Every structure is written in C-alpha cells, then in structure tokens.
Amino acid sequence: MRKSLHTRLLLAASAALLAFLGLAGIALDKAFQNRTEVAVEDRLKGQVFNLLTAADLDRDGRLRMLEEPPEPRFGRIDSGLYGEIVNAPGQIVWQSKSLLDKRLPDAVMLSPGQVSFGWSQMENRDPVFLYRFGVGWEIPGGDISAFMFSVAEDTRRYNNEIGAFRRTLWAWLGGAALVLLLVQVFVLRWSLKPLAEVAAEIREVEKGEREYLENNHPREISRLTESVNKLLGSERDRQRRYRNNMDDLAHSLKTPIAVLKGWLDSQSGHDGRQEAEQQIERIGQSVEYHLRRTASGAAIFSRPVEVGPIVSELVSALHKVYADRNVETSADLPANLVFFGDNGDIMEILGNVLDNAFKYCTTSVCIKGASVGETSRPGLRIEVSDDGAGFPDSVGSRVLNRGVRADTRTKGYGIGLASTRDIVGIYGGTLDIGNQKPHGAIVTITLPGG
Amino acid sequence: MRILVVEDEAAIRDRIVDRLRTDGFVVDAAPDGKEGLYRATEFPLDLAIVDLGLPRLDGIELITRLRQRGISFPILILTARTRWQEKVEGLEAGADDYLGKPFHLEEMIARVRALIRRSAGLAHAELICDPLSLNTSTQNVTVSGLPVDLTAFEYRVLQYLMLHTGKVVSKTELTEHIYEEDQDRDSNVIEVFIGRLRKKIDPGDKLKPIETLRGRGYRFNLPRRE
C-alpha cells in the first residue's frame, strides 16, 4: 500500500529538518573549532610576548631569561605549557622547566618577525599547538642576532572547550529537533485536517450517512469537493430521470398493447386472430422483460437500503394478494442487513422471488438473510424457500431463461426470475435456483458489497 | 354484482366494461380519479377496478381516500408500471390485488371473481345452499343437480341474495346492485324477478328459499355450505 500524504510529508519534512540541523551543527562546530584555535594562537602569542619581556641580554651579550616568566605553568613539569628559545644555529638558549628533558619538535629557523602556528607532535606526548616567532635581537656591537621563540600548549584545554561546546550544541540542537518535529507533526495534522475531514465525509457518504460533502473546506480542496458534490447530484438526477423515463416508457408501450389485446379478445372467429394474439403476446413479453430488467445498478455511493422492512412490506402485500392461500411465512434476517443499491431494484429482486414462492408454495415460505464480507459496505445473501413441488427437473436452470416458466399451468409472462437474474447480474451478484429435501424450491440471491 | 371501472384510456375501459357486462356484472365506468371517487362513494359497489395512472386524481390517492372513508369493497389495481415498488404502494394504500398491463380479460375476470368470493368469505367459485348451487365462474345454477335457466337479471338477484344469506336485503339495495345507473329502475320489477326466481328454483314451493319481509325486503333462508 502506498504511504499516506501525512506520512510522506512527515518523513520528508523530518528528513529535511534533521539534515538542516545536522549541517547547522557541523557548521557551528567547525566555526567554534576555528575560533578556539584562533584563541589558542592568541594565547600562545601572548605567552611568547611574555617570554620576550622576561628575556634580555646578559653582560656577555648572550640572551638569558633574566626573570621567571609570569606564567607559572612554564615552571611546572608536564603542565601542558612549554617554552623554548633557540638561536640561529639551532642551539637551545632557554627551555621551560615544564619540558624537563624533552625538546619541542625541530623546526626551520624563522626569520625575524616571521610567525608560524599549528599542530605538532611531541615525542611521547600528545599533539600540541605550537607557536613560533622569529626575533632579531640587537647585540652589542650593533649586530643583529636571530632567535626563535617557541611556545607549545597541549590540546587538553582545547579539547575540553570543544567537547563542552559540542555537548551543549548537540543537546540544544537535539532538543530543538524534537520540538520542531512535534511542531511539524502538529502543523501537518492541522494542515491536512481538511483532507481528513473530506475523507471522513466521503466514508459517511459511502455508508449513506450523508448525501453530500460539506461546502466549507479550504479553497485548495473546495473545487474538488464541489466537483464531487456535482457528480453525486448528477448521478442521483440521472437515476431519477432514468426511473421516470422507464415508467413513462412502460405506460406508453403497455397501454396500446393492452388496447390491442382487448380488441383481439373481442374478435372471436376473426381470421388471423390467433396469429395476431401470439405476436401481441410476444411484443408484450419483450416489453415487460426489458422494462423489468432495467435496474438502476449500483450507483456511486448508493445509500444502504435496509432489507428487513422491504421484506416485511413485500410479505404483507403478498399476504393480501394470496389471502385465500393462508401462506405461513418465517423470516430470519439480521437487523443490520442492508443492500447498497437502488431501493427499487432490491424490491424488484425480492418481490419477484417472493411472488414465485407464494405462488408455488403449499403452505409456507421461509426467508433467510445474512451479510457477506467484513467491509464497510458488505454484500448480502438471501435464501427464499418454499414447501411446494419445487422446480421440475426438466426445467432446471431453464426457468432463468426469458419466457420459460416452471409452471405452465399458470398464466403469465414467465419472465420474473429471468429479469431478476439480470438485475442481480447488473450488481455483479448471482441468482441460483434449486430444490430442497424433502420438497420445495429454494432460490439463493447473492449480492456483492458496494 | 356492481363493479366500478376507473380507467382513463377509453379503449381499455370500454373493453373491460363490455367484458364485465357480458359476464353478468353491473358496471359503472369513470374516466378519471375524481369521477371515480364520486361514483365509489355515491353508489353501492361490490368491487372497483382502478388504473393507477389516472388524470385529476391519481389511482393511489383515490384508493387511499376510499379507505379513509371506510369504504371496504375489494379493489383491483390495473397498472402499466409493474415494478414491485408501485405494486406494494398500491396494495399498502388499500388495494387487494393488482394486474399488470397488458392483461388478458380472462385473467381480469378471474381476479375479479376471486376478489368478490374472498370478500364474501368464500373459498370456492361455487355458492351452495342445498339443494341450490350457483357457480360464479360458469354462472350455472342447479337445483338438486338439475340446471336452471335464468335471465341475466334473475341471476344477479339470486347471486346477490345467496352471497347475503340470512341477511335482510332491501329492494333498494337489490336494485342498486343489479341495475346500472342509467337504466330504468322500477322496484316493482324486482318483485317480478323474485316471483320468477321462486318458480324456477322452487317450482313445488317446498323449499321457500326467498322470504318476503313486508316493508323491509327479502331474505335468503337456505343456509350456505362453507
């Protein structure tokens, strides 16, 4: 099954949000890292200037650290801050006590005023930030002697600052992501609420709980709902017009046939009367058959028709018609048994089948019904049985063929079950006939759900 | 037996009327629902045949109004709209049977006779008041198994009396049920028919089936076999 709009939007927006927050986090992390490195460089540069302040030439003209550097970490072993001064030949002029017996990594002598800053790996130690500064010191005699001041700081402080920043950053970004996701879910639900409402209204129309969709939806979908309403309205109009046209057609065709039939009845002994009667009879049968089988069919979103009351109406009417037969009827129909289709069609189907049962039963007619399927628009199965002679073996399924009837002794058109089967067929259902033991006919109608 | 036919299609109405008269019924005819309502409420009828698609007053409405006025004679619906929805609507309005157009006049006559029998509480076409027997289908009358030759009016009088055995039937009631509206009505003729009937069905004057109740009418005294 394809994902819902809500899921699609939620997934897409969540992915975009996470990507944005992730990239923003990385960018911020990088920026902070750079800023921290600049801060380290400034700090080390300050330390170099401190060393420059503390150093001076002695009486012999050699560069000496005349006083202890102001930064106490230089005097503490493995403090993480190291200082070193080398002269132009690369000889160490001064080393901080924190270096103990180590040396800062060798490097090319920098010319006066030249600066270098970067990562460097000390022997048997963690990486350090190393700041070097080339100095030209005027010695007695006017010459310039080159020195290189180097200050290194291990990465502990740097790592601590970065780590603290990252924890804060990602905690806030994670929190923001969570809040934004929740806001997003709410916004999506709120934005898609009209669609959910339309879907619910369509379900109600399907179930027959309402005739049309509401007209107060946002303009983006109001065109759609208006179109659906127009479609529903035109479908219902079409059905009504169709039914009226069929009624008018029935009247306009059958009345002249009845006139002709009456006239022929009065023409006893007239040549060709029998032939004319047969032809009129055929025309009458055709008209009757084609009019009866013109079911409306399963209309779009047909309202559910309760089957129980229809059976009651038909049984009551048939008791009246067959009053002198004293037919006993029993009906076992669930209260919620409904037919999704035209009211007139289910009445036509059940009327024809029940009429046959009343006509051919001995004393009793039994009606059973049940829903078929678990959908919101289930189908139904109805069995109508009687205790009469049943369908003759010679007739079998031929009774479903137009114009063939089981009991040729009774006058009529023999098209009831045939037209019923056609109407059932329009709904995609089936009509089966058979005999039951010890005697009696049974007609089973199965109609699929809407 | 007096029958009202309410049908707007003149050709069909005339055929039905002719056929009913041929079969010995007294027939009134109306071309629309309003006139049908008038005739059904003004004249004593034994049955009405009503087309559903009537001008001025729809057949269903006509039947509903008749039943609302307490008129209980059987009603046979004629309809070109043979869907069950219309049939049930007509039967629920108060009709007793339906006949779809086009129909055979024989079938219509059979339905009419069945409805009249049913309204009289009879299960069969034969009215038997021993030794008298009257078949409503064949219109044969026998006394002790021997056929009796009756005129149409004599048959109508006898059938009406036999359908109302033990009840007092006034001359007026009898006149209204055996004469059509536009026929000359002379209640003295009823006495003549009664006299002839007595001679034909009880030539020995032993059974005395028809009792004259002075100033009130007649009573058929032979019990009817159920």
Image (cartoon, rainbow, N blue to C red):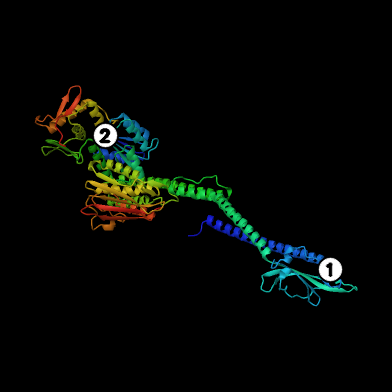
Viewer-nearest residue: A171 or B129: A171
The answer to whether A402 appears left or right of B215 in the picture is right
Residue A419 location (% of width, % of height)? 34, 52
Viewer-nearest residue: A106 or B189: A106
Is A78 placed above or below B4 here? Answer: below
Residue B46 location (% of width, % of height)? 26, 34
Viewer-nearest residue: A294 or B162: A294
Query: Disc 2 marks which amino acid?
Result: Asp
Among the 4 quarters of the image, the one containing residue B91: top left
Residue lying farthest to the bottom in this orientation: A89
Residue B99 location (% of width, % of height)? 31, 43
Labels 1 and 2 in the same subunit? no
Residue at the spot 53% in from the left edge and 50% down from the top edge = A195
Residue lying farthest to the top in this orientation: B215
Query: What chain does badge 2 belong to?
Result: B
> Could you tell me if residue B80 is visible in this image?
no
Residue at the spot 23% in from the left edge and 38% down from the top edge = B118
The answer to whether B42 appears left or right of A71 in the picture is left
Residue lying farthest to the front in this orientation: A59
Residue A250 location (% of width, % of height)? 38, 47
Viewer-nearest residue: A280 or A38: A38
Please say if the residues under marks 1 and 2 sit with CB atoms less than 8 Å apart: no
Query: Disc 1 marks which amino acid?
Result: Asp
Q: How far apart in space, not on screen, are marks 1 and 2 (Cα)?
A: 147 Å
Residue bearing mark 1: A56
Residue bearing mark 2: B46
